[in-house]
Structure formats: C-alpha cells, structure tokens
C-alpha cells in the first residue's frame, strides 16, 4: 500500500489504518468517529486527502477539452474560481465526479477521486487526442493535500498567511503562502462546514513544517486529525454523493440528482444526447435520502428498502447521523416512491424497520 507524506503523523496519533484506493489511510483515531465528527462540526479538523488525483490541463485547447468531457459549463470559470462537475461515459454512466480549477488562461487543474486516478487519466487523455493544443499531466504524486474543516478553521489558518481568508468566496481559491510554504488555499471541502483545502508540493520536511504550524495555531481551537470514518458521516449528513456508492458507471447524473451541474445548454459533450433524453423523459428512478423512524437499526450499504413487502431499492450509503442521533441513508428508488414523506421499511436481520423518505441535506 502507498503511504502519503503524512503517514507517520497518523500512526503517531494512534490511527487505525486501512487500505483505501491503494493507500494506507486512517479510518479513525483513538477518540472515535463520533468525537471526530463533532470536532469538525464544532471546532476544526484536519483530513489527509493526499490520495486524491490532480491533473494539469494546459494549452489553447484546454477549455475545449474540459467542456467536451465534463457536465458543467467551465466557460463560466475565471482565474481563482473552482467548479464541481462530473464526467460521463458515452452511455451516460458516471466516470467520476471532480473539481475543475481555473488557474489562469489556458491553465486548469482537475481534482479527481483517489480510487479513480488511473481510470480518469486514461479517459481524459483518450479524449485529449481530439484536441491538438492541449497537454494533460498527472501531478497526483507531487501534490500534497490537506482539508482543514470546521467553524474554527479560519481562526487556525489566518495567523499563518497574509491573505485575508474571509475574502475568499465559496468555491474560490488563491495562490499564496501559508506557514511560509507556497500553496493553493481553496475555499472548498466535503463536510458542509466552513473550511479550506491546502494544495502544496514539497518533501517530508515541508509537510512536517505545515503540520507543526497548523497544530501550533489550532491547539487553542481543539484541532485534531479526522479519519475516513468521520469523513463519511459528515458528507452523508449533507447528502453529498460518494463515488462507488451513490454514483458510478451504472448511474445517470439526472437520476443521481446532479442535474444542477449538467449544463445541456452549453452544447454537445460526451453523453449529452443520452442525458438530454433521460431529462426529457423523466428519470425512472431517483437518488433519495431516508431517515430511520427507530433507533434499533443503523442502515448499511446493500440493505433492501421495501414498501408493502415489495422491494423498491437498496441502500447505497448508510450510517448513524451524529447530528440527528438516528440512522440515515441514501438509495435509488423508483420515481413514484421518491416523494419526501413516503413511509418505507428497511429490511435487515430478517425483519423490517420503519423509515421515511426525506429531503436532503439531512442536516
């Protein structure tokens, strides 16, 4: 398994390490997932997300390539802005969801999920062959990435940079210095909280210096490492899709609730005809959120959803919501069962447990 540059910090903190996307990553620390979750909601937590992939797309055809392979309209970007988007296969199934950063004219960065780096790179480079003036470089192994998330994240980071962080809008970024290290400071994250993502290059000594600076300033605010377990509960409470669970090669962006990033008006792009047909006809199934009406069951991936004894779907994500103190989940159901307020059952342990379809986000 691959180790990120922060590996020793996780083991020194007593993390339980697991295999994830080919990396050995921390799933939780001794305080436990619930406490880590609360730290991010109430204070400041640090996630090592260096397993994510970064592709540098440059050249006069860079925008044309990105417009061709992604759903959102990247022509709306200006330098310093980022955009949530996705790529689809020819049949409308989702290759991956990603972030598109416009660094400068003809210069973009795509940030993709760590488990999909090889697949995504092959997909992007395949389509880049259609455009003579574009270069695609995989910088994933050179970029270190930390997500500093929580209401106390500005208080932790501001003393480390002269850039006024309060002036960075959501989904915007600056190239600056923080803790004396050149980096991209991006007002993004996967928790639904105030937070930033820090992209920087350098060796272990550089990484150690950044961590030391973060903990020096963040100690007064309750800073702590946060693992993949709490990352999952945090994103689930906000109804954020996880690739491989809620979206994958078998799901269409319209049925996945990603119509808001699907800009058909921008012109033809990969799978635009298929997606337009699904939108025009109406999706036959939809990704919904549901909340347990009992504390006796925490829904897990693969649990069957039923209505009047008939299967209507399966859980794609499920866990306890620390904020609501009840089990929550996501699932694809036939459109007629997708209305919030619909009462359903979750089948587990050879019996059923009551639940209700609810509007997301849960919290």
Image (tube, rainbow, N blue to C red):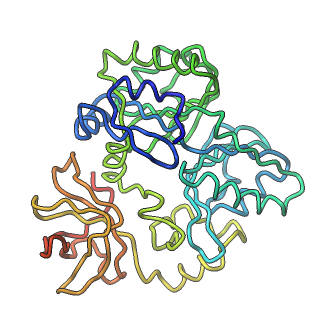
List the single residue furthest toward the front: 1
Q: Is residue 27 left or right of residue 56?
A: left
- Identify whether 328 is placed above or below 59: below
- Residue at left offset 44%, top offset 46%: 19
Q: Residue furthest right?
A: 132
**For residue 311, which quarter of the picture?**
bottom left
Taking the image as shown, residue 118 lies to the left or right of residue 115, namely right
Residue 50 vs residue 223, the one in the foreground: 50
Task: In the rendered view, tell whether residue 31 sits above or below residue 306.
Answer: above
Q: Residue at x 22, y 53 (%)?
A: 320
Residue closer to the observer: 136 or 25: 25
| Residue 169 screen position, x and y as percent | 52, 36
Q: Relative to residue 48, is residue 239 depicted above or below?
A: below
Instruction: Tell how many labels.
Output: 0
Instruction: Give the residue displayed 22% in from the left and 76% down from the top.
Output: 342
Q: Is residue 303 above or below residue 183?
A: below
Identify the residue shown where x is 16% and y is 50%: 325
Residue 140: x %, y % from top left: 64, 40
Q: Where is residue 91 shown, x and y percent of the image?
A: 62, 77
Q: Quadrant of residue 30?
A: top left
Residue 256 percent coordinates (x, y): 45, 68
């Amino acid at each position: 398994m691959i180790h990120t540059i922060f590996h020793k910090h996780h083991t020194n903190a007593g993390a339980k390490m697991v295999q994830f996307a080919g990396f050995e990553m921390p799933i939780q620390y001794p305080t436990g997932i619930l406490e880590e979750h609360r730290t991010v909601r109430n204070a400041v937590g640090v996630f090592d997300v260096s397993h994510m992939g970064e592709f540098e797309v440059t050249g006069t055809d860079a925008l044309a390539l990105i417009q061709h392979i992604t759903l959102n309209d990247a022509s709306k970007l200006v330098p310093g802005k980022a955009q949530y988007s996705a790529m689809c296969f020819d049949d409308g199934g989702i290759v991956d969801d990603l972030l598109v950063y416009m660094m400068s004219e003809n210069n973009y960065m795509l940030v993709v999920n760590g488990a999909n780096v090889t697949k995504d790179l092959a997909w992007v480079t395949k389509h880049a062959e259609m455009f003579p003036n574009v270069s695609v470089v995989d910088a994933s192994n050179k970029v270190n990435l930390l997500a500093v998330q929580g209401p106390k994240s500005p208080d932790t980071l501001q003393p480390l940079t002269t850039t006024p962080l309060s002036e960075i809008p959501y989904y915007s970024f600056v190239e600056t210095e923080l803790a004396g290290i050149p980096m991209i400071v991006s007002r993004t994250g996967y928790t639904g909280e105030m937070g930033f993502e820090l992209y920087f290059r350098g060796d272990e000594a550089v990484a150690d210096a950044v961590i030391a600076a973060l903990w020096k300033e963040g100690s007064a605010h309750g800073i702590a490492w946060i693992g993949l377990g709490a990352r999952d509960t945090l994103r689930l409470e906000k109804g954020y899709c996880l690739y491989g669970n809620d979206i994958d090669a078998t799901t269409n962006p319209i049925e996945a609730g990603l119509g808001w990033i699907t800009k058909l008006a921008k012109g033809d792009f990969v799978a635009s005809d298929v997606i337009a047909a699904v939108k025009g006809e109406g999706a036959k199934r939809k990704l919904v959120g549901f909340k347990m009406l009992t504390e006796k069951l925490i829904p897990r991936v693969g649990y069957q959803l039923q209505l009047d004894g008939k299967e209507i779907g399966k859980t794609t994500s499920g866990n306890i919501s620390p904020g609501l103190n009840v089990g929550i989940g996501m699932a694809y159901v036939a459109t007629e069962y997708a209305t919030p307020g619909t009462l359903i059952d979750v089948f587990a342990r050879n019996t059923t447990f009551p639940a209700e379809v609810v509007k997301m986000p849960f919290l």
